[in-house]
Amino acid sequence: MRHPSGWGLVEALAALSLLSLGILGLLWVQGKSMQMWRSQQANEHAAWLAQDMAERVRANRTRMNAYQLAWGQKPMAVDCSARPCSTLEWAMSDLAAWTQEVQIRMPGAQTQVWVSPSDSQHLGIALAWREGGTVVADQGALAAGLSCPAQHACYFLHVRP
C-alpha cells in the first residue's frame, strides 16, 4: 500500500496558519483593550481634576468670576504660600496651581473655566486632551455654547459652587 506523500506537511501548514490567525486576533483584542484602558484613565483624571477645580472655587466663591480661563490660556502665577493674599490673588494662585497639576497628570491637556453668561452662579470646567491621534469630539453633539478643540476628547463639568 502506498501512502500519499506530503499531506502531513500540508495539514501542519494549515494548522499553523489557523494558529497564527488566532494569535493575531488575540493581539488585536489586547491592543484595543489597552486603548480603552488609556481612554478610561484619561477620563478618570479629567473628572478628578475638574472636581478639584470645583472645590477650589467653592472655597473662594466670593471671587468665582476670577476663576476663568479660555482654551490654551496660561494663568498668571501668584505665590500665596509666603505672604497673605487677597481673595483675587488666591483665585489666581488656584488657577496656576490647578493648570500645573493638569499638565502633570495629563501632559498636553488644555483647560477652560467659565462662568455662565445666563447664570452668574453656574460655573463650567472643561478639559481637553488628545486620544491616540483620532478625532473623538463631535462638535455637533455638544450643547449650545460648548466647544471642544479639534481632534480632542473633552470632559465637561457644570457646578453651582
Image: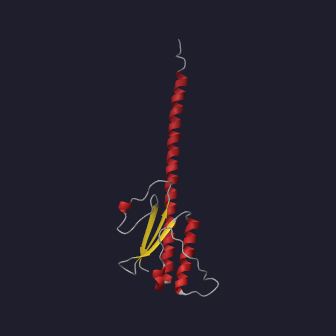
| Relative image position of residue 150 (x, y in whole percent) | 44, 59
Residue at coordinates 45% horizontally, 66% vertically from top-left? 155
Task: Give the residue drawn at x 52%, y 84%.
Answer: 88
Question: In the picture shown, does residue 76 fall above or below 4?
Answer: below
Residue 111 lies, with reference to residue 8, above or below; the image says: below
Task: Looking at the picture, tell me which residue is in the foreground, 134 or 42.
Answer: 134
As drawn, the residue found furthest toward the top would be 1
Residue 142 point in image, percent of width and height: 37, 64
Q: Residue furthest right?
A: 82
Residue 151 locus on image (x, y percent):
46, 57
Q: Quadrant of the C terminus?
A: bottom left
Query: How many marks do you count on the picture?
Result: 0
Which image quadrant for residue 125?
bottom left
Q: Nearer the viewer, residue 65 or 10?
A: 65
The percent position of residue 9, horizontal first and vertical second, equals 55, 24
Scheme of image coloration: secondary structure
Query: Residue 39 vs residue 85: left or right?
Result: left
Of 105 and 80, nearer the camera is 80
Residue at the image position 38 percent from the left and 61 percent from the top: 139
